[in-house]
Amino acid sequence: MSKKLKPNDDSSRPRVLFEYSGQDVPDNVTHVQFHPSVVDVNNAFDNCKSLIEVILNDGLKEIGEDAFSGCTSLQEIIIPSTVVNIGRSAFSGCSSLNKVVLNDGLREIGESAFHNFKALQNNTIPSTVTKISYSAFRNCTNLREVVLNNGLREIGQNAFQNCSSLGSITIPSTVIKIDQHAFYSCDNLRYVVLNDGLKRIGRNAFGRCTLLERITIPSALVAIDDLAFSCTNLREIVLHNNERVQIIDEAFAGCTSLERFKFPTLSTRLNNVIEAGQRDIETKMDDIPAVEWRGGEIAIPAVHREIENKWGMAEMVIGLDEEKLDKVVRLIRYYEIKEATTLFELALWKAKIDQAEGASTDRGACRVEVPGSVKDAIMQYL
């Protein structure tokens, strides 16, 4: 581990290019080039506030803990493709750093690696990165755009918290978990795209994203934790898989503007039943209060109800009206089995006619009705 030398009394000494090969580093160094033999670096340049430029060598494998932490004059860094890991707080507090180039080959961005970047405005995460760790880009208040690529598996706790200039984010289909507070208080975030593959959204993951108005939940998702979307302007939630996702009671706590939940998959199933000729389902759908369905989309109003929290105090919960949803699901299932049974009976009828001999077969005599017990058994598997 290298350490910095104490500055000598000659404050007027010239600042020249410094070649780093693992030795101690002067405090007043301004320009650094890494020797080709260097394979890792740990806290050698910690709090080198005069450091303006660093040229990293190909062959470098790891930028370790606090390597360039607090280098407040550093403006640009290009990470070679040979680097596989950026360690904890490696560039934390580099407040003037406005350009960061991350290349393919990098696998993990460590805890607080780019924490408190005030100048950084955009960044692209390479497809080789599988994890963005705790607080990696926290408090990058001028970060406007982040490109996440397929290959990423997890967005860690507080990863982009307080990135108050971030306007949109697309989560790749390879991401399976967005951890708690990952995008907390990104109060300029208007558009969020969640892709299939995502399984869990952690506590307060999008809490206090005050400009977010609509969110679509992908079909693979299995759990939305409490306060995941505590967003005061959220008005509409689209659920692709209503029967699989586990929504914690307080997942949408604080969503005082929430108006409705929409169900594209259920809507398609309903439209298929109607197009198959089972039009009496329309009257039954109208009998379920407040459920909107005409126009091709099923929408169920959000409900506001009071619950007792863990401290025994009354708390307002805003969420899905599961009773109405259950009625809609049961009704569609009933008509799907009805349609399926009709097709089954027609198939049996046709098979019996085909087996009959002679052209003068009485077709009426060939009709077959599926027994009620068979219908019940089919129903259990739908």
Image (cartoon, helix red, strand yellow):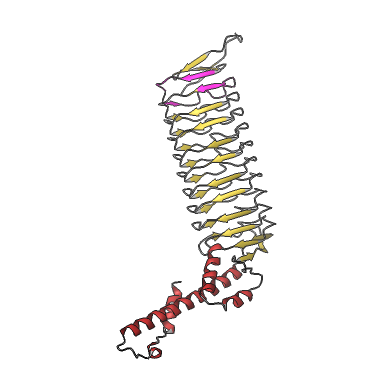
Measured as percent of width and height from the top left, residue 111 is found at 52, 37
What secondary structure is the magenta-colored segment mainly?
A: loop
Q: Position of residue 50 (x, y in %)?
A: 59, 19
Q: Residue furthest front?
A: 359
Q: Can residue 364 be seen by looking at this rendering?
A: yes
Q: Does residue 205 show up?
A: no
Residue at image position (48%, 17%) is 24
- 190 on left or right of 198: right
Total labels: the figure holds 0
Query: Looking at the image, which residue is at 33% across and 88% down?
Result: 359
Query: What residue is at 41 percent from the left and 21 percent from the top?
Result: 36
| Left or right of residue 348, residue 209 in this image | right
The image quarter in which residue 256 lies: bottom right
Residue range corresponding to the magenta coloring: 31-54
Q: Is residue 32 magenta?
A: yes
Residue 359 relative to residue 170: left or right:
left
The answer to whether 56 is drawn above or below residue 28 in the figure is below
